[in-house]
Image (cartoon, rainbow, N blue to C red):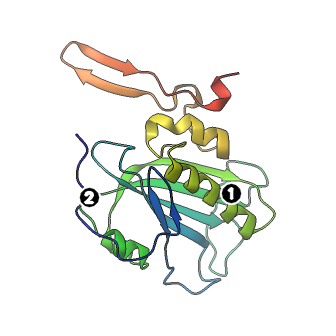
Amino acid sequence: MVEPILDQITSTPTFTGSAGRAWLTHSPREPGDSADVASWVIEAPGAHPLWHSYFMMLIHLRPLPVPQQTIFYLGGATHEIWLYALHPDGSRQKRIDGYAEGCDLLVPLNFAAQFIEPSDEVAVKRCEAAIQRVCDGTLSPDTDYIRSWMHLFGDNMVKDKKRAGETYIVTPEGVVTIPARPGPQDLN
């Protein structure tokens, strides 16, 4: 049974499709103050039975005025994405309006990767193409489908690439392993 969506969003979606909708969020920060490029709230109610929404954030990896340590997992990387499930009881509208305290991120995150694009605009378009696929139902944001995300953005931040996306269920008889859903790279 899929949990019902209790909080309503009053903003017009940026993306819509047969399997979901998504909203570009508003950043409360001034450009140049942070590495934030864009972020989105994605509603995909069929992706998981317990939570219905996800948060994707895109950052740039350029130096900032305030020094920060950036760990590069991909030589020459220019951007990094993070994909989280959102707590189903939070206010997605607050997160869309730019307030992080409105809806908690579920950890660990579902996916992260660094990639190379010539500009922020091209990196945003790459993320938006993935978001539209989620809304259309051809890409799932759930961790069972991480291999499809690895195909789109790379696997440089995935610790165990060979076993990525496997699910482990602990029973009194032992551990049951459910294999990962194959991604396009596994079908060749």
Residue at (81%, 63%) from the top-left corner? 118
Tell me the CA gap for discs 1 and 2: 28 Å
Would residue 108 appear left or right of 90 to someone viewing this image?
right
Q: Residue at x 77, y 50 (%)?
A: 75
Task: Inspect this view and state whether residue 131 appears.
Answer: yes
Give the residue type at disc 2: Ile
* Percent position of residue 82, x then y: 53, 56
Which part of the image, by quadrant, shows the C terminus?
Answer: top right
Which of disc 2 and disc 1 is earlier in sequence? 2
Circles 1 and 2, Cβ within 8 Å, touching? The answer is no
Residue under label 1? 126
Of circles 1 and 2, which is in front?
A: 2
Identify which residue, 34 or 103, lies in the foreground. 103
**Residue at 65% of width from left, 38% of height from top?**
151
Residue at the bottom extreme, as displayed:
30
Which labelled disc corresponds to residue 5?
A: 2
- 23 shown above or below 81: below
Could you tell me which residue is drawn at 41 percent across and 52 percent down? 44
In the rendered image of this protein, does residue 8 appear above or below residue 48? below
User: Does dot 2 land on a helix, a strand or a loop?
Assistant: loop
Q: Quadrant of the N terminus?
A: top left
Number of numbered markers: 2
User: Label for residue 100?
Assistant: none
Q: Would you place residue 9 above or below residue 104 in this image?
A: below
Depth order, front residue of 49/99: 49
Secondary structure of the residue carrying tag 1 is helix
| Residue 11 pos. (x, y %) | 41, 77
Image side of residue 132 versus residue 187, left or right: left
Query: Measured from the top left, where is residue 81 in percent x and y?
Result: 59, 57
Residue type, label 1: Arg
Camera sees residue 154: no
Seen as rendered, the residue at the extreme front is 18
